[in-house]
Image (cartoon, rainbow, N blue to C red):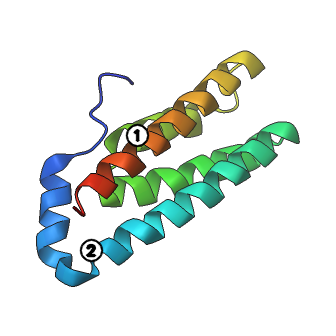
Amino acid sequence: MEHLPVLDTALVAELRDIMGQDYPMLVAAWRRDATQRLEELTGARQADNREALRRAAHTLKGSSSNLGAARVAGLCALLEQKTMSLSEVEIDSCLVAIDTAVSEAGDALQSTLD
């Protein structure tokens, strides 16, 4: 999934135009939601609850896709689709990649506010 861009810059530009002054609030809401979903993913992994893991990945995928966080959305789609068949090591690796992608997307989105 590293081949996916951190952001879909065309979508982000479109959102900035459409949202205008409200765009910073949209970015802030995504950052709060992404943090909460990362906590849910971690909790589900610790509880070995693959259905909860799948649901949290699905939710983060949707919000990330809507905001143009392409890499986060792609990684979450992979986790959502393969949750039941991945090994614990593969799940852990995917969660690390999602966490990194959320951080990168947050930084990239923040730079669109400047």
> Image check: 4 left or right of 73?
left
* Residue 67, above or below 72: below
Q: Residue at x 48, y 44 (%)?
A: 102
Q: Regarding mark 1 in the picture, which secondary structure is present there? A: helix
**Spatial distance from mark 1 to mark 2, Cα to Cα?**
18 Å
Marker disc for residue 78: none
Marker disc for residue 23: 2
Can residue 85 be spotted in the picture? Answer: no
Q: Residue at x 79, y 45 (%)?
A: 44
**Mark 2 closeness class: few <14, some 14–19, many ≥20 residues within 10 Å:** some
Question: Dots 1 and 2: beta carbons under 8 Å?
Answer: no
In the rendered image, the residue lying farthest to the bottom is 21
Q: Residue at x 70, y 31 (%)?
A: 84
The amino acid sitting under disc 2 is Tyr
Question: Residue 66 in the image: x percent, y percent?
Answer: 33, 60
Question: Residue 92 in the image: x percent, y percent?
Answer: 69, 25
In the rendered image, the residue lying farthest to the right is 47
Can residue 60 be spotted in the picture? Answer: yes
Q: Quadrant of the C terminus?
A: bottom left
Q: How many marks?
A: 2
Taking depth in this image into account, of 75 and 23 the one nearest to the observer is 23
Where, by quadrant of the figure, is residue 63 drawn? bottom left
| Comes first in the chain, label 1 or label 2 | 2
Q: Residue at x 64, y 49 (%)?
A: 38
- Which residue in the structure is indicated by mark 1? 104
* Residue 73, above or below 89: below
Question: Residue 105 in the image: x percent, y percent?
Answer: 38, 46
> Image check: 89 left or right of 35?
right
